[in-house]
Image (cartoon, helix red, strand yellow):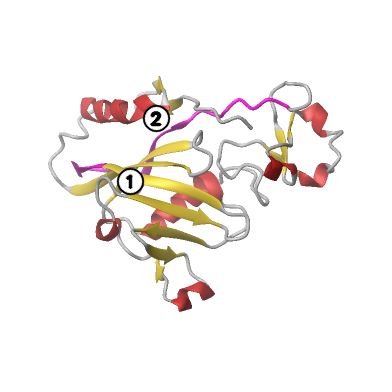
Amino acid sequence: MQEQMPNGECLLCKGVFSKRQMTRHLQECLASKGVLGTPPKTRVFHLVVEGRYAREYWLHVEATANARLQSLDGFLRDIWLECCGHMSAFTVEGESYMSGGPYAELGDRGMSARLADVLRPGIVFEHAYDFGTTTHLRLKVMSEREGEMKGEPIRLLARNEPPSIACEVCGKLATQVCGQCIYEGEGWLCKQCAQEHECGEDMLLPVVNSPRVGMCGYTGQTW
């Protein structure tokens, strides 16, 4: 599949902007809504998340500094990753923070650490979900503000629009992908052509707006 850089929607104002424009727009949009000017109440990080090997999938997220890595892990699972309850891990400045399981006995830290204790503006870190068919993410702390953030400790600000992927047989919009052929960069199919795919119906997964598309049993976000 040829890499695309689709636009994305700001969920604060519903405006549509390119991946490059979105960071600057969000700073202006948050300020125009009074978010940046509220009395200091809590530290809030602005994170950009993208597929490490599929950069056309990206998110802008705000998270309170008191939120824990396990909350960020859960957010990423819900919107982009969760399929079969696999393990996951963050890697921050050489330290690994695991979601649990037997690997924790090897000296890896758990995900109970607060974001404030491991992150700061400018830092780049990674997330990996499923250590068999792994989905790798790259995250960067773009900025930090002080203000009020109501509701959940992590919220979505913007995300990419679904990339338009062509059926490799007829050129129509692909709606299915073969979980076997995808490892060769192939297997993108429209509904009609998918019926004749040689790997069989059992290998087909829906085309979804996530860097985990076509992996394991992933069929889309859980909320």
Q: Earlier in the sequence, mark 1 or mark 2?
A: 2
- Residue occupying image coordinates x 15% and y 34%: 37
Label 1, residues with CA under 10 Å away: few <14, some 14-19, many ≥20: few
Residue 82 shown in magenta: no
Q: Which mark is residue 129?
A: none
Q: As drawn, which residue projects farthest toward the bottom?
A: 105
- Residue occupying image coordinates x 62% and y 55%: 133
SS type, badge 1: loop
- Residue occupying image coordinates x 53% and y 45%: 80
Number of numbered discs visible in the structure rendering: 2
SS type, badge 2: loop
Q: Position of residue 87 (x, y in %)?
A: 54, 63
Label 2, residues with CA under 10 Å away: few <14, some 14-19, many ≥20: some
* Three-letter residue code for mark 1: Gly
Q: In the rendered image of this protein, does residue 44 appear above or below residue 88?
A: above
On the image, numbered disc 2 is attached to which residue? Answer: 11
* Three-letter residue code for mark 2: Leu
Kindly report the distance in space between the C-alpha atoms of the residues bearing marks 1 and 2.
16 Å
Pick the residue in front: 95 or 209.
95
Q: Position of residue 192 (x, y in %)?
A: 81, 27
Residue 145 shown in magenta: yes
On the image, numbered disc 1 is attached to which residue? Answer: 151
Q: Quadrant of residue 190?
A: top right
Q: Which residues are magenta?
A: 143-167
* Residue contact between numbered discs 1 and 2, judged by CB atoms under 8 Å: no
Q: In the rendered image of this protein, does residue 167 appear above or below residue 47?
A: above
- Residue occupying image coordinates x 42% and y 58%: 90
Q: Position of residue 82 (x, y in %)?
A: 57, 52
Q: Position of residue 62 (x, y in %)?
A: 32, 42
Q: In the rendered image of this protein, does residue 69 appear above or below residue 5?
A: below
Q: Nearer the viewer, mark 1 or mark 2?
A: 2
